[in-house]
Image (cartoon, rainbow, N blue to C red):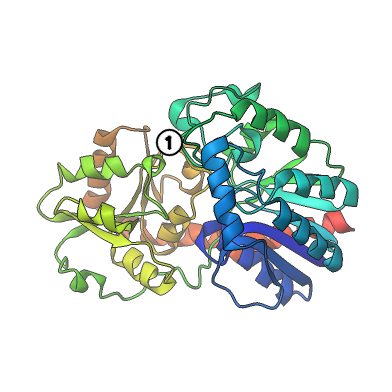
Amino acid sequence: MKVLQINSVSGVGSTGRITSDIHNILVDHGHESYIAYGRKSTENIDNLIKIGSRYENYLHVASTRVFDNHGFGSSKATREFIKSIENINPDLIHLHNIHGYYINVKILFNYLKKANKRVIWTLHDCWPFTGHCAYFDFIGCDKWKTQCNSCPEKNSYPSSLFLDNSKRNYLNKKEIFTGVKDLTIVTPSKWLASLVKESLLGQYPIKVINNGIDTETFKVEKSDFRKKFNIEDKYVILGVASAWDRRKGLRYFYELSNNLKKDEVIVLVGLTEKQIEGLPKNIIGISRTNNVKELVQIYSASDVFVNPTLEDNFPTTNLEALACGIPVITFNTGGSVESIDTDTGIITEKGDVRKLENGIQKIKKVGKEFYSDSCMKRAKEFFNKNDRYLEYMKLYKELVD
């Protein structure tokens, strides 16, 4: 079996790691696997294909900022990439994030319809069925159900500084993304699956396959992190994100810091240098790291993981924390709540800082050890990447056979 995956990145970030993990499982089972990516890669594999150049990425970004036409740039790069697809002639094409300033979705889908290939599309957010945004929970918008226009999230990713092209984008996506003969949608969460059913993609079969992590890597390890930052006697409240924007709930850590006890400290991973400079004294800021070992040591040294995300699909940070034996507190948001149960964490009302504080104190009172075994057991049983991504291989075989 010959499989081609397409994603904005490879080997970096949550979707990049998912893509490379699926690739490795395919190769281990004797299949031929290729990854095509648009922007970043940390891997060195034979069957890795770069789509377009950095210059073309920048042009796509500029066009998005001015004309709000994200996904409709990179024409030349996409045509050249299609030649590569034809040379590979895969049995199945697996799409992931096709946004990210690197590919032209119209040219790509015109090819998919003509080539009559079996296609799987894993949605990692809501961008494929909106006129602009990747998420809309924060503002409670439901225009995506009928027809987007006058987008209230125009300035959010993929941000437009001038025009609002959301109505045309929506209509174009409806025309382009529908009518593929053999396409299956996969979502990592039941929450996203329920949205897809109500969207312009609702005509396709939908399957839920949870994200997975490497539970042999993410596990409890001895760590000198506390000693390094002189917090050996502190109760460590951890937050991790690839980018701390409005959606990820950074403001709630600031609010939490106002009421921290003397023996408590917040550690945030994934901040920019500018964000770190403006932190209160009781928040330790760490810039984004792709060093998994360093991340595991930070998880292992922490007492509770807090994820105040306001919009999310199925965050792998929750899974990583569980695997490292840390209970998780999350807002009742999207698919974030699907990763934990009452033995492994606490779900609180979205935006309620007081209930976040109460959750932290409840876990602090009984201790991290009360939850640790259940957390690690849940991570291994439900979110081991080998088990989860073997589900993809099973799906591939079903479709190809």
* Residue in view at x 48 percent, y 72 percent: 217
> Would residue 201 appear left or right of 293 to someone viewing this image?
right
Q: Is residue 9 visible?
A: no
Residue placed furthest toward the left: 262
Which of the 4 image quadrants contains residue 221?
bottom left
Does 400 sit above or below residue 143?
A: below
Indicate the position of residue 75 as horizontal and vertical percent values: 71, 50
Q: Is residue 119 above or below residue 28?
A: above
Q: Give me the residue at 15% from left, 47% from top.
A: 260
User: Of residues 40 and 135, which is closer to you in this image?
Assistant: 40
Q: Secondary structure at mark 1?
A: loop
Q: Where's residue 333, x and y in %?
A: 45, 37
Residue sitting at x 56%, y 23%: 142
Q: 264 or 291: nearer the eye?
A: 291
The residue indicated by pointer 1 is 332
Q: Give the amino acid type for the residue marked by disc 1 in the picture.
A: Asn
Residue 279 appears left or right of 326:
left
Q: Residue at x 28, y 40 (%)?
A: 252
Count of all numbered marks drawn on residues in the image = 1
Q: In this picture, is 138 found above or below 330? A: above
Classify residue 92 by image quadrant.
bottom right
Residue 179 picture quarter: top right
| Quadrant, the N terminus | bottom right
Quadrant of the rendering where the C terminus is positioned: bottom right
